[in-house]
Amino acid sequence: MSNEQQIIDSRLKADYEYGFVTDIESETLPPGLDKNIIRTISAKKEEPEWLLEWRLKAYRHWLNMEEPQWANVTYPKIDYQAISYFSQPKKKELSSLDEVDPDLLATYDKLGIPLEEQKMLSGVAVDAVFDSVSVATTFKEELKKAGVIFCSFSEAVKNHPGLIKKYLGSVVPYTDNYFATMNSAVFSDGSFVYIPKGVRCPMELSTYFRINEAKTGQFERTLIIADEGSHVSYLEGCTAPMRDENQLHAAVVELVAHRDATIKYSTVQNWYPGHPETGAGGIYNFVTKRGTCLEENSRISWTQVETGSAITWKYPSCILKGDNSVGEFYSVAVTNNFQQADTGTKMIHMGKNTKSTIISKGISAGKGQQTYRGGVKIMKGAENARNFSQCDSILIGDKCGAHTFPYIDVRNPSAQMEHEATTSNIGDDQLFYCNQRGISTENAVSLIVNGFCKEVFNELPMEFAVEATKLMEVSLEGSVG
Amino acid sequence: MMLEIKNLYAGVDDKQILKGINLAIMPGEMHTIMGRNGSGKSTLANVITGREGYAVIKGDILFNGESILDWSPEDRALTGIFMSFQYPVVIPGVNNTYFLKAALNAKRKHKDEKELDAADFLKLIKSKLAEMDMDANYLQRGVNEGFSGGEKKRNEILQMLTLEPALSVLDETDSGLDIDALKIVAEGVNKYRSPKRSFLVITHYQRLLNYIEPDFVHVLIDGQIVKSGGKDLAVDLEEKGYSWLGA
């Protein structure tokens, strides 16, 4: 055992000197990030030694990294020592909904996520993450029959350590970037999905995230593995209540698609965007999402509807390793009032005949600023790679902005690249045309915006498409007239 | 009286364009406004329908006896004023079915009538499509998206037939139409004429008037109606031009 390890062990055995901040509803670690905090998180989750080691490696790496400055967003400097890195509701590991804190259930109700109803009506299995710990998981039995593993990340660490060890960090290594590295050190919980060979997952898998505790960063970690010939559609939805202080959210999502497998990952993101008149208190959403099409004929499709957060920094990407693999990115992003978003995708073509499609729709209103940043890279060995990119922006009002930065790097002459980009205003003439037919301005805006987003909404599962349409209306309320 | 325009002065950006218009349209009447480019024809249509940016300086517009100057464009539309646009607007991704159903149901709601469901609406719109000799694939296309000039104008008339306004303002509906499209549009208008419905047809040329017969023709020059008469006036204009009227 190394000297350092001995020190770590001794510290781990010692009583944690700061103790927990515990109120009636939840347990929260004091603010700050150091090795002790990481050890405490790992110990509380009863993690194996190797995982703690992995976290600590990430932490040591993070200490030497610089926060990225290249994104087209501005925000006050984040004090990483003022953030608490772990929080969990007091009760945990419940076997039925009856045991869930009624207040918690009431909160879900307010968010329109009644677990019971969802169980009975929609056939969607829900792994609900409230703050950092999963408190309810449904539909386990049906999924079990199909051989699908769908559980919280912590459970997976306990019950499926082999899979976690094999795939954790295989797509987003702990050295990847500032926020992903921080996540690797302190990630709290998240979801784990494994679809075995040849299985078509019998239902849409869905997780609702929600930030509860003030000043508590959320560090979700999600890992989805689709084995040979399997198929899965995963829905992620976020919503957060009013806040006065900025909250940091740095999640990591890793997807792995084996031969002939398909992963469809859909997100509706509606974190608190900040006070509409001052911009205060919104969520900082710094997310790393990446998928690898590891083998032939695999397919990964990202669909996102981003309406929330004060700042969004997010580039769901695909690494197309397998021959004939396909990567897709469909995105609608809304920035209203003081929101800023720098979002897009990366498509890395490595295999032969790989194909990628990028459809990005940006909507800016109020003083919102939005940047599309996309990278398409065709590597030397990627014969006959094809990419189609389309980036459209719509502006509502004259105080918002839209920016497009497409990066294209082609190292194989057989590549076919297409890029289209448009920027337009919601024209007064369009609004008047609708008004003249008796359609109110508010309805006209939502009609025009929904038409603009149609290609992306078409990619969403039905229930999400409805939710997304409503979300657009709420997000753009009062932006015209 | 359906529409009464009283001593109307109006303009855009401090520029006075209409200089004392008086016009009275009774139910069932078709009036035509003719004039050269820049005479104020389209301004008149935009002022009647309440388009932003057009300011009324003096005078009044009454619809069914009520002043509508303070009304929003959608309230004017819901009360029964329709404009066929000179340049119909494209709304990408919003299909015609959805758009027209939203418009019709807004109107029905305004009249306290039950909103039409998808099936009833489809039945209605299909019969209107047949009247305008339009293909059913129209329903799936975006509003005016990829439409030819003729298709756009036909779409305007189709919307009129569906929304059933009391007053239809047709702004240069004949421009950009080939002869076949012109006939279909005119036929649509003629079928729609009734003792309760009125028209204000704005046009540059007399040729539309070969197919629809106005009750009155007014000549607009420099923001004023300089001459009014029956349909023969249009024929005179075609032969002699506008200059003999002193412009």
Image: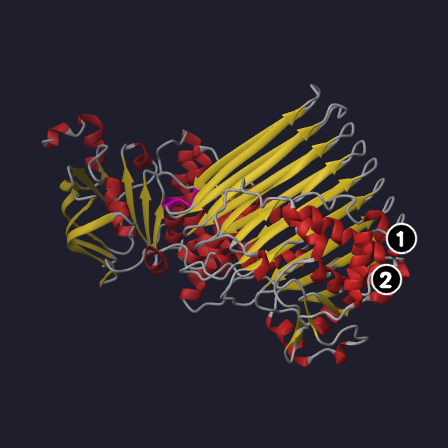
The residue nearer to you, when weighing A78 against A429, is A78
Where residue B72 appears, as percent x and y from the top left, is 31, 58
Position of A349 compared to A474: left or right? Answer: right
Q: Contact, CB < 8 Å: mark 1 with mark 2?
A: no
Q: How crowded is mark 2: few (under 14 residues within 10 Å), some or many (20 or more)?
A: some
Residue at 67% of width from left, 63% of height from top? A208
Position of residue B45 measured from the top left corner of the image (x, y, whole percent): 27, 46
Residue A459 makes an appearance in the image: no
Q: Does the magenta stretch include residue B245?
A: no
Residue at mark 1 shares a chain with residue at mark 2: yes
Residue in view at x 89 percent, y 48 percent: A198
Mark 1: secondary structure? helix
Q: Give the range drawn in magenta.
A: A425-429
Give the labeled residue for mark 1.
Answer: A162
Three-letter amino acid code at the position of disc 2: Lys
Is A426 colored magenta in this rendering?
A: yes
Q: Write down the chain letter for disc 2.
A: A
Q: Which of B63 and A229 is in front in this view?
A: A229
**Type of colouring:** secondary structure
As shown in the figure, which amino acid type bears the numbered disc 1?
Gly
Report if residue A297 is visible in the image: yes
Q: Mark 2 points at which residue?
A: A158
User: What kind of element bears circle 2?
Assistant: helix
